[in-house]
Image: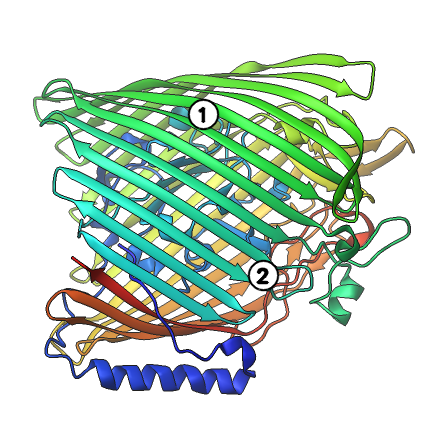
Amino acid sequence: MKYSVLTCAIQPSKLNGVKRFYLLIYCLSISAYVFSQSDYPNTDTFRRVTIPLQEVVVKAYEQNRKLIEVPASIGLLDEAQLNRFGNGSILYAINTIPGIRMEERSPASYRLNFRGSSLRSPFGVRDVKVYYNEIPLSDPNGNTYLNGLSFYNFQSLEAIKGPAGSLYGAAIGGALLIRTLPSVWEPGVNLDYTTGSFAMNNIHTNVLWGDSSHHNDFDFNHISSNGYRIQTQSRRDIATWETQLKATEKQVIHAYIYYSDLFYQTPGGLTQTQFDQDPRQARPAAGTSPSAVQAQAAIYQKTFVAGFSNEYYLSPLWQNTTSVYGSYTDFRNPGIRVYEIRKEPHFGGRTVFQYKRKIHSAELQVNFGAEGQKGFFTTADYANNQGSAGLLQTNENINNWQYMAFAQADLKFGNGWIITAGASFNKSSIEYASLSPLPPLDQTRIFENKIAPRLAVLKRITPTISLFASAAKGFSPPTVSELLTSSGVIGYNLQPEDGIDYEGGIRGNLFQDKLYFDVDAFFFHIKNAIVQRIDTNNVYYYVNAGSTRQNGIESYLSYQLIDHPQQAISHLKLWASYTWYDFHYHSFIDVNSQSSTVINYSGNQLPGVPTQTLVAGLDISTSMGFYANLTYTYTDHTPLNDANTAYAGSYNLLGARAGYRTIFNRRLKLEIFGGVDNVFNTTYSLGDDFNAAAGKYFNAAAGINYYVGLSLGNLFR
């Protein structure tokens, strides 16, 4: 469960940087003195204990095994890792996973990519299949509104890196599995309030009730901020309800509903000159194009999702999990050029059968099933009259449908070998009806059937160390927004991208489980890569970019220096996450049909992918209840266009969080904390626009900023 927060009455946003720092230290010091007078200062049961990574049981690829026995590149985040940072976003936490990069173009405008998949992500998520518990959160269009979830909706997540199509369909970049229920069930009420720089206010209420056989969880989060740039105000309200019922010894029923109401302004990209002059400014007017402020550029997004799943144990050998869901998104975007309105209802379901049995000394596990999604989208573009919808320009109805069937077999031998083989058969289509301008136009795109196989082998060479190797094929069809843009059918000839990935890795523990390591290398070749372009009117369009070669090394290392709960310093851990990439176009010749210009980009670096990324940290806690977390990030310079003529500079970041936690009357949990991000006050862009016309690449990130708060848990238990 997440723990709740109250805070000092003085708002840090009204103080200068030095005064904010002293306010933070003062709050922590006073709170430490007051709360240390509790009759029950021993917080061992309250500290966020992290299970050794290799011992964590993961669900990825339906393995349900310890990580050391899973032949795949998996990144894990649990509650302890999520809570190393502020509770407004999972961005900093997820960026500790090597190979994964989450960016923020403006507050609440997130972009998530696995191994460079941001090539086709102007915002949101592409090439990554996201699951919310048992249902696909990604819609049949391939888009995921990850910003519709609250920080508090994440209890843990598993990130599958590399093509995951054998079980998850169109997931050439990977898959993200989100779990929302707490691992330990404790009925009660939890209250949270946090405040910080830029007039940030974050309120959270969590109510849990029920017993061991029937859980209920209601969660509400409101977060608002004025933002760090002009035209970056944001507000987000998210309410969720979940229930889990153990109907019989053989059956578990899980139902969930969530509603999100999101608003955030979009300041637009800046040129290098504008970024250097004033990185906090919004995009200025240029020619006939209004400024972001004049256009009142913003996103208004409301999403409702309802899902139901049923887990049934048919026999000691057989079980089935079936889930169905319905979703509706209302999306409005007054942009620089047009005012876009989208209605996106869709539904779908997934069923997985599992068969397990012993064959002499070996264990056989077979998973097979199917998944389908259907969407009925409408989109209309109007002239943007300073934030109001004007004259209708285009009006389109879009029906998209995708389904797949999959099967996978795992054979675990007694001598430490595990072999996994699986494949999926995939089909997708798009029906497009243009209602305006006249005459009406009906079109249908049926993409060729795709088979996505995967073969993996793992060998446990010692009880605590394993090696694995895998080969997988992945694919990703173009989305509706990539095929059809507000200026017409620009990308109608787009083809699905596909590729083959070969990788191998080693993970395990040494020195009595004090040292944990996880290293893997991959060679990923993509054909028909889909690449984003932006024209002078800020319209996104896409082209197939020939072939790419994406090779890399991803590594994670941690060392537990101290692990003695009764000592003054009870826990001390150092860790580091390092990524090295060589991503370039193997063959890409761009022909401009209007100017007859031929440009050869072959051999150039892929835009948006830094060569090196390092994230390192130190975690320390004491038996008295004090703790501190330090995080350092280095990001290499990053190419911003296919020609490699523009780059974002490298940057260094430092963040810290410190706090104190205790338990009153053996029940009430209390935690006070504070933190600072971007200690060096570095000027950098987090979420660049690639191949942007007129060089409008840069979206400035926040400078030094602070937050303070206090948590109350298990109230009214």
In the image, 486 versus 566, the foreground residue is 486
Q: Is residue 107 visible?
A: no
Residue type beneath disc 1: Gly
Q: Nearer the viewer, residue 526 or 353?
A: 353
In the rendered view, would you say 273 is above or below 697?
below
> Is 442 left, or right, of 168 in this rendering?
right
Query: Measured from the top left, where is residue 253 in percent x and y?
Result: 22, 29
SS assignment at label 2: loop
User: What is the secondary structure assignment of the residue under circle 1?
Assistant: loop
Could you tell me the amino acid type at mark 2?
Asp
Instruction: Point out residue 512 in the picture as x, y percentages from the top left corner.
Output: 15, 61
Q: Which residue is mark 1?
A: 169
For residue 312, what is the image quadrant? top left
On the question of residue 679 being in view, the answer is yes
- Callout 2 crowding tier (Cα within 10 Å): few <14, some 14–19, many ≥20: some
Location of the N terminus by quadrant is: bottom left
Residue ID at (30%, 18%): 368
Q: Earlier in the sequence, mark 1 or mark 2?
A: 1
Residue 199, image quadrant: bottom right
Whole-angstrom CA distance, mark 1 to mark 2, is 32 Å
Q: Which residue appears at 24% of the width and 62% of the height?
A: 713
Q: Is residue 294 above or below residue 226?
A: above
Q: How was the colour assigned to the protein in this rendering?
A: rainbow
Query: Which quadrant would the C terminus be assigned to in this image?
Result: bottom left
Q: Which mark is residue 116?
A: none
Where residue 328 sits: x, y (%)? Answer: 50, 31
User: Which x, y percent locates residue 391?
Assistant: 82, 34
Q: Residue at x 55, y 79 (%)?
A: 14
Judging by the rendered image, the residue that carries numbered circle 2 is 636
User: Residue at 70% across / 58% down in the picture?
Assistant: 698
